[in-house]
Amino acid sequence: MAIIEVAGLAKTYRVARARGGILGAFRQLAAGAYQEVHAVAGVTFSVERGEMVGYVGPNGAGKSTTIKMLTGILVPSAGRIEVCGLVPDRQRTQLAARIGVVFGQRTQLWWDLPLIDSLELLRHIYRVPAARFRANLDHFREMLELDAFLSTPVRQLSLGQRMRGELAAALLHDPEIVYLDEPTIGLDVVAKHRIRDFLRRINRERGVTLLLTTHDMSDIEQLCSRLMIIDRGKLLYDGGLEAIRDHFGTERTLVVDLEEEDGELDVPNAREVRADGPRRWLRFRRTDTTAADLIAAVAARYRIRDLTIEEPEIEAIIRRIYEEGIAEGSVGSAVTVTPFSSV
Amino acid sequence: MDGLDAVGVGPPTLGRSLPEYVALYWRLVGARARSQLQYKVSFALLVIGSALNLLVDLGEILVFFRFIRSLAGWSLPEVALLYGFSSSSFAIAEALAMGFDQFHRNVVHGTFDRTLVRPLGAFFQTFASDLGVRRVGRVGQGLLVLGIAAAWLGVDWTPDRAAMLVVTLASGTTIFFSFFVIGAASSFWTVQANEVVNIFTHGGSFITAYPADVLTSWLRRFVTFVVPLAFINYYPTLYILGRSDPLGLPDWVRLLSPVAAIAMVLAARTVWSLGVRRYQSTGS
């Protein structure tokens, strides 16, 4: 039995159509002044216990709405959901005791109190037995290195520290599933690394099922073996990460700032796709060369002042799925949805 | 049960007993108090502000006592008795309902989502989100006026009158509290609605400071049968003073404050549940 079962899930909002003037305001009261927005338009999937699933899509694609329905915050307009054998909106508080939620942009913690106070309060809210709380807290203190800021008020924490606090808070009561909404947003590379490492460990060691939304494809690449792409309320793709990566995500871009302007760069295994004075964009395939080899090759020929590597954006991948399509079979049997027939 | 549980007014979940709920309430209210104490200057200003408020309130009563000798057939201490009931039950209700009074912010800022992902009813969480400790002065002031007025009138505290005193304070507090809940719930529809409901909380505290006799008859019927403000103090005070309703309602009506309070609780509970349901279907 899957831990998350979703069938034909839909959420339609009624949004008041904006009209100007007093007359418009009166008209709005009349029937038909509303516009229907299909935030989620028929989504079906299931998640097995212990999976780590990336749930991605552009802003407004329906990610947050789906997660709100999975947690019971929102009631679906149509379709069926079962999470841990419970119906989220009807058995919300029962389900809440068995899941954890981390919203990257919103805190679950008591803003003005030391981090440890929040954890103590959550312990009582979730009725975590004292021994279990002690064991979990010790474990998280070590894994997330919380000791340095455990008694600092949350509002004084750096974003990375706060995020580590949020993770500890979300996992104190041994949830079976944790939903993470943009868990690495705004974090530097070191902080991202630490958080991904922690997520991998709790998944492996505690068997926690993870569903995360992100804009950062490297989050997905490093954490998830399965990817679900949602766009305009519909699942565009649900399957292995490799298939997507091999087809669409292999091309990365090396951006270099040269010491002096030069003609078109000529390096093996990469092509210049854009030039702006001394700044050049070189696109290369993971299968052809590594970033390190490419940088060495450029440095051998030109004097570099600065460089960055751009990962493919999820938006770019989705655009390419629309443009090129994923033919069923061509990317393996895991693919369950083909694109853009009748949106 | 599940349906009620989902909207946050159902029975305790996770098998929590009442003492556990009480303990959790104090823990959460305590956390809120400690948060406020973090801002020492603003906390100090708050305390000073409350003290000044209290002085103004007391001054208001003195002025009132000085210029008005009787009102619609009510003597000064009789009006003071009404005022004492109204003022103290309003202050207790306002202190207990502090979380509801500020609730619309949760809907505006979207923090209500956080409430909904915790294993506790939304009602309890909102209730336990704040306690207006600084209202204690106003409560004391109301009770003081009540005591002075009763002593002045030489009320004979027979068991039935003493019971009436307690029942009246409890009912009045419950009725005011219910208005605060309805006000909070109205922000699920529109944040502006909060202002309309303020008519019944703050406006109600104002209107109940005077005998209902001063109101025009339709308004009097309104505050008796529609929004039962008259049961907060007017009818119980008639009973304690051994008077009949000057406008001719039967004497047993004077005993109906608890009934009015229960009706208000049911109304508040319904509006709150509908509001949470609405939030869950619109997400805003």
Image (cartoon, coloured by chain):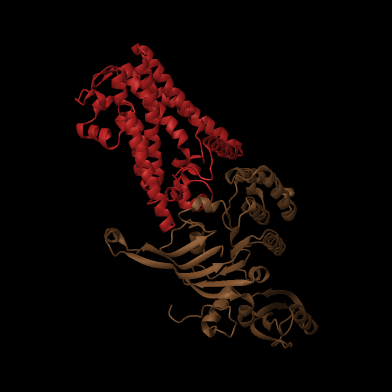
Chain colours: A brown, B red
Report x, y in % for residue A324. 54, 85
In this view of the protein, can residue A122 be seen by the observer? yes
Task: Decide which of A278, B65 is in the foreground and name it.
Answer: B65
In the image, taking residue A93 as reference, residue A116 lies left or right, namely: right
Report x, y in % for residue A106. 56, 55
Report x, y in % for residue A71. 51, 57
In the image, taking residue A107 as reference, residue B124 lies left or right, namely: left
Residue at x-position 51% and y-position 39%: B130
Outermost residue on the front side: it is A1
Q: Please, is residue A273 above or below residue A103 in the view?
A: below
Count how many numbered circles sit on residues in the image: 0
Task: Decide which of B124, A261 is in the foreground and name it.
Answer: B124
Report x, y in % for residue A124. 60, 42
Residue at x-position 59% and y-position 60%: A180
In the image, taking residue B14 as reference, residue B228 lies left or right, namely: left
In this view of the protein, can residue B284 be seen by the observer? no
Q: Please, is residue B190 above or below residue B83 in the view?
A: below
Q: Quick one: quadrant of the N terminus of chain A?
A: bottom right
Residue at x-position 60% and y-position 49%: A109
Task: Decide which of A1, A81 is in the foreground and name it.
Answer: A1
Task: Decide which of A147, B50 is in the foreground and name it.
Answer: A147
Q: Please, is residue A130 above or below residue A79 in the view?
A: above
Residue at x-position 57% and y-position 33%: B44
Q: Quick one: quadrant of the C terminus of chain A?
A: bottom left
Which quarter of the picture shows residue A300? bottom right
